[in-house]
Amino acid sequence: MKNNLSIINTLLLIGLISYVLFQNFGSTEIQEEIKVQRLSIVGPDGHLYISISNPEKQALATIDGEPISSETNRDLPGIIFFNRIGDELGGIFHDGTENESFAGITFDKQKDDQILAIMKDEYKDGDEWKQWYGLFLRERSDSITQTQMFRDFHEETAGYTEKEREEAYQAMRKLQDEKINVYRMFLGMEENEDVGLFLYDNEGKERIKIYIDEDDHAHFMILDKTGNAIEHLYN
């Protein structure tokens, strides 16, 4: 009798599991809403290709599958893309507060940081709202990557005080902006409401400006390395 009951219970359990599985198998039902803190698109081996996340769960910036540094935590919601060897490729981000709203799409250089970006930023300056938006191009040195610079910085400043570390960080950023990852082009609207094309030399210094100002005057300017205009056509 006990054996018969065991067999019956087993058959009922198998039947129940089969019913649940077949009820959902091949279903084309559209779910109205899925709530998650992070959605990770992975390969069959678990390799991460896309991360869609809130600020708290966002994926770290990686090279060869390893975080760039111990301080690569992000606090922005968005979508981050990775290739099949574990390098971050860029992504889409957005966020804002009562005093600021910003968003962007970035594309990274191989084994390095962004070289192409479409961005916008609106922020409150006193009682006035200011904004800029457009397409950026950067040129990054092949002599050293952004990743290696940050790794060297963390090693060299391990025993620094907070003040010494901040001074070293500002010096590193100045070197980056002037030699390592300089702006070469901006196409869009600047904070002063000039709309146009702005070109920079390999030290990040503005050299050519073609733009319309806020009063609808057209400008074509050529500047020397010190920022002085050597040609300025104006209408």
Image (cartoon, helix red, strand yellow):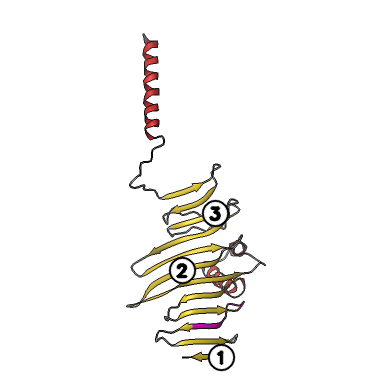
Residue 58 drawn above or below residue 128: above
- N-terminal of the pair, mark 3 or mark 2, is 3
Front position in the image: 151 or 18:
18
- Quarter holding residue 230: bottom right
Q: Secondary structure at mark 2?
A: strand
Looking at this view, name the residue that lies furthest to the top: 1
Quarter of the image for the N terminus: give it.
top left
Please give the residue where the numbered disc 1 appears in the rendered image. Answer: 231
Residue type highlighted by circle 2: Met
Residue type highlighted by circle 1: Glu
- Residue shown at the point (59%, 75%) measured from the top left: 178
Please give the residue where the numbered disc 3 appears in the rendered image. Answer: 82
Give the numbered dot on residue 119. 2
Front position in the image: 106 or 181:
106
Number of labels in the image equals: 3
Q: Which residues are magenta?
A: 201-210
